[in-house]
Amino acid sequence: MDDTQPDARLEQLRERLAALMQRIGDAVAAAGRQAQPPQLIVVTKFRPAEDIRRLAALGITDAGENRDQEAAAKADMLRSLRLRWHFIGQLQTNKAKSVVGYAHAVHSVDRPQLADALAKAMAAEQDRTGRAPLECFIQVNLDKDASGHRGGALAADVPALAEQLATAAGLRLAGVMAVAPLGADPAQAFEKLAELSARLTEAHPQAAAISAGMSQDLEQAVRFGATHLRVGSDILGPRPALR
C-alpha cells in the first residue's frame, strides 16, 4: 500500500466493517448478550494479503482460512501483524504438521484420526517452539442426511471425540462448530447446536465456545449463543472467481 495516496479500499473496508459491527451489535442487543459479545473472525480465504493488512489496521485480530497452502503463506507473510489464524475448512491429516505451525485454532475437527494427527503434530511443534495449546472445535454435522454437504461429526460421536481432544497433550477442547444446512432454517440448526453445546459442557465445562454464523445467518447464531462468528463477504465483498 502506498501511504502517500488515499486508500479507497481501506475506506471501503472501514465502512463495511462498521456496518457489520452495527449489525452484530443489534443482534447482541436483541439476544440480551451485551456482556458476552461474540468474537468476529474475518474469513480471508482467496483474498490478498494487502486486504488483511488493511483489516489489521482497522482493528481486526482474527482471520479465517480454509486452505493450508494459502493460509501458511499468508501467516508467514503477515507474521508481524500478530493475528490469530483460524483454520475453518475440512482438514486432511497430512496437513496437521503445517497447520499447527501457524493456527491459533482449528474449527473443523471431525474425526478421531484428525485429532490424533493434530496431537502428534503439536507434540513436535511445542518441543520446537513452546507454542500455546491448539484450540480445537468439534465440527458437528447438522444435516438430517448423515452424508450432508457441510461435513462434520455426527452428534452421537461428539462425546468420544471430545474426550479424545480434552485428554490430548497440546490440544484444548474449545467447543463446537457447525454450518447451517443448505436450505434449512438456520435458527433450528443453531438451536440444535446450542443443545449439543450444553451437553458437551456438562462433561467439559471449559468447552463452551460455539463457532457458528456467517454473513447470511449471524443473527440466528448470536441468538443461540454463538461465541465466534465467521464472516467474509459482508466485509470483503463477493468472493473472487476461482482460477
Image (spheres, rainbow, N blue to C red):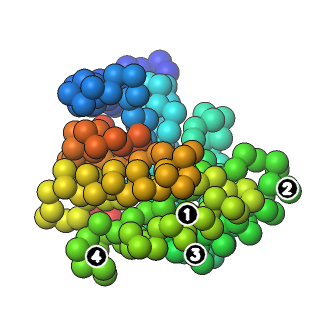
Q: Which residue is mark 1?
A: 162
Element class at badge 4:
loop
Is residue 96 rendered to the left or right of residue 53?
right
Q: Residues within 10 Å of mark 2 (few under 14, many from 20)?
A: few
Q: Camera-side residue: 201 or 126?
A: 201
Q: Earlier in the sequence, mark 1 or mark 4?
A: 4
* Residue 82 visible, this orientation: yes
The nearer-to-camera label among 2 and 1 is: 1
Residue 148's disc is 4
Vertical relation: 146 (above or below) 132: below
Which numbered disc, 3 or 2, marks the residue closer to the eye?
Answer: 3
Circle 2 residue? 128
Amino acid carrying mark 3 in the image: Pro
Q: Is residue 134 left or right of residue 54?
A: right
Image coordinates for residue 83, horizontal then vertical, percent: 58, 38
N-terminal of the two: label 3 or label 2? 3
For disc 3, the marked residue is 112
* Front residue (pair 169, 55): 169
Above or below residue 151? Residue 28 is above
Q: Residue at x 40, y 28 (%)?
A: 36
Q: Amino acid at mark 1?
A: Ala
Secondary structure of the residue carrying numbered label 1: helix
Number of the front mark, 1 or 4: 1
Residue type indicated by callout 4: Gly
Which one is earlier in the sequence, the residue at label 3 or at label 1? 3
